[in-house]
Image (cartoon, rainbow, N blue to C red):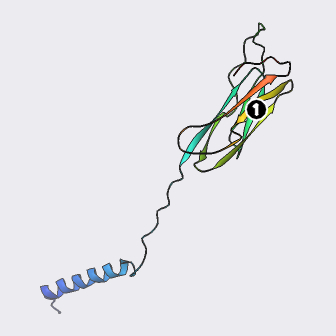
Amino acid sequence: MRTTSRTQTVLAAATLCAAAALATAAPVGAQPAQVPRATQSSTVYAWIDGWGGGTVTSRPAGISCHTTAWDPYSSEEPPPNSTGPCSASFPVGTTVTFTATPDPGSAVNGGPDPASLTVRSGYNAVWAMFCPTDGLCSAG
């Protein structure tokens, strides 16, 4: 029967611990792992004004905001607020380009303003005005 002394057991355990530590150590000169940064996004808002109808769209896609024309002097109730996505989230630093397309019987009276923007953290907005082709339009 073989007898192991307490000193031999402690030395064997210490040797195993040192070997395990060396096996998990990074090589000399190795760079720490880079943790990818989360991409920061911000919201862009489309505001449509006027009594005409039309759509403001964005490129890259995300905004497709439409409003319906109405005559404020008629007995009809005004249409509901703009429909479709009138805001979208884009990565900060993205250049977004806008297009204003009038409905039949309407014209673009202003905008989109700005025609393109670079998304930044904070408030980002584009504005457009559509007017009926008969000349009836709000002052904005």
- Residue at coordinates 78% horizontally, 14% vertically from top-left? 71
Q: Position of residue 130 (x, y in %)?
A: 77, 26
Q: Residue furthest front?
A: 139
Q: Residue furthest top?
A: 75
Quadrant hosting residue 4? bottom left
Q: Quadrant of the N terminus?
A: bottom left
Q: Position of residue 30 (x, y in %)?
A: 42, 77
Going by the image, does 120 lie left or right of 21? right
Task: Classify 139 as above or below 100.
Answer: above
Task: Classify 20 as above or below 95.
Answer: below
- For mark 1, what is the residue? 55
Q: Quadrant of the C terminus?
A: top right
- Residue at coordinates 59% horizontally, 51% vertically from top-left? 93
- Label 1 SS: strand
Quadrant hosting residue 72? top right
How dense is the environment of label 1, judged by Cα within 10 Å: few (below 14), some, or many (20 and up)?
A: many
Task: Classify 59 as above or below 128.
Answer: below
Q: Position of residue 132 (x, y in %)?
A: 82, 21
Task: Classify 32 as above or below 69.
Answer: below
Q: Residue furthest left?
A: 6
Quadrant hosting residue 104? top right
Q: Position of residue 89 (x, y in %)?
A: 60, 42
